Amino acid sequence: MFNLSTLLSEFITLWVVIDPIGTLPVFIGATASLEPRLARMVAARAVLTAFLILLLFILFGQVILDALGLGLPSFQIAGGLVLFLFALTMIFGDGKPSHEVAQVEKPLSDQHVQARRVAVFPLAMPSIASPGAMLAVVMLTDNDRFSMAHQAMTASIMTVVLLITLLILLAAAPILKVLRETGAAVVSRVMGMILAAVAVDTVLKGFVAIGVIPSF
């Protein structure tokens, strides 16, 4: 049986690493020169691409770990450290708005070509399906710790977060008018703090698993 605490914990983890609010300025910057119809297409294609990427990591991430002979505690500790560094970039760095929008190329003459390109990069990767999100879904669906039912639940939660991301992107213009760039940056930093706490907890659980520290 899945308890509310587990559902909420996984939802918060996936929400933070996918960071729908932080993706807003990236989406606005990438689609500024596109027609509204094409901008909506970009949102749908970016979320679908991110879903397929993260699903691929859910299905084959553990297989890759097993093929390399890596144990879960090692991956937990390494993944937690990477997530922590990722959280630090959200807290102290320029954040998504300035860092990823700067990667958007100048508008192409063919808007359809531009729409297809920005949907994959930088929107699907690395904004939505970020490195932190890829690591998170692998750790949350480890075959040695979680049943198929639990993994299906995690995939369902991920799908819900991505659907919310799609709705936020489709409502990007009015939302950004309310938050503005400063508001989006503040929200992104708060999420970075939450992610840092999740990352530290992941590292501690890895140390518990190998017996370095007692269970807590």
Image (cartoon, rainbow, N blue to C red):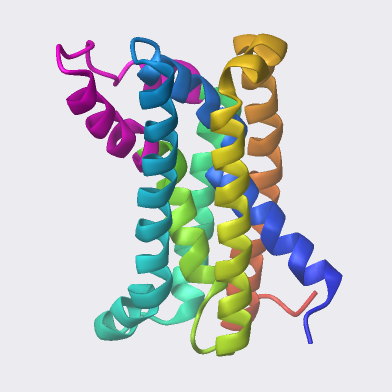
Which of the two residues, 88 or 117, is positioned nearer the viewer here?
117
Is 99 included in the stretch rendered in magenta? yes
| Residue 108: quarter of image | top left
Is residue 118 toward the left or the right of residue 42 in the image?
A: left
Q: Is residue 96 visible?
A: yes
Task: Give how far across and how far down residue 206 sits, in percent.
Answer: 58, 73
Task: Give how far across and how far down residue 121 sits, in percent.
Answer: 29, 34
Query: Among all residues in the image, which is located at the extreme right?
Result: 4
* In the image, residue 14 above or below residue 150: above
Residue at image location 43% in from the left, 19% down from the top: 36
Residue at image location 14% in from the left, 11% down from the top: 109
Q: Is residue 93 visible?
A: no
Quadrant in the picture for the C terminus: bottom right
Residue at image location 54% in from the left, 31% down from the top: 169
Task: Give how far across and how far down residue 117 sits, in percent.
Answer: 23, 31
Task: Give how far across and how far down residue 127 sits, in percent.
Answer: 43, 36
Query: Among all residues in the image, which is located at the extreme left?
Result: 109
Residue stretch rendered in magenta on the structure = 96-125
Which of the two residues, 215 or 127, is positioned nearer the viewer here?
127
Is residue 72 toward the left or the right of residue 19 in the image?
A: left
* In the image, residue 143 above or below residue 127: below
* In the image, residue 84 above or below residue 22: below
Residue at image location 39% in from the left, 76% down from the top: 59
Which of the two residues, 46 or 127, is positioned nearer the viewer here?
46
| Residue 196: quarter of image | top right
Quadrant in the picture for the N terminus: bottom right
* In the image, residue 70 above or below residue 185: below
Is residue 82 toward the left or the right of residue 2 in the image?
A: left
Q: Main secondary structure of the magenta part?
A: helix
Is 104 included in the stretch rendered in magenta? yes
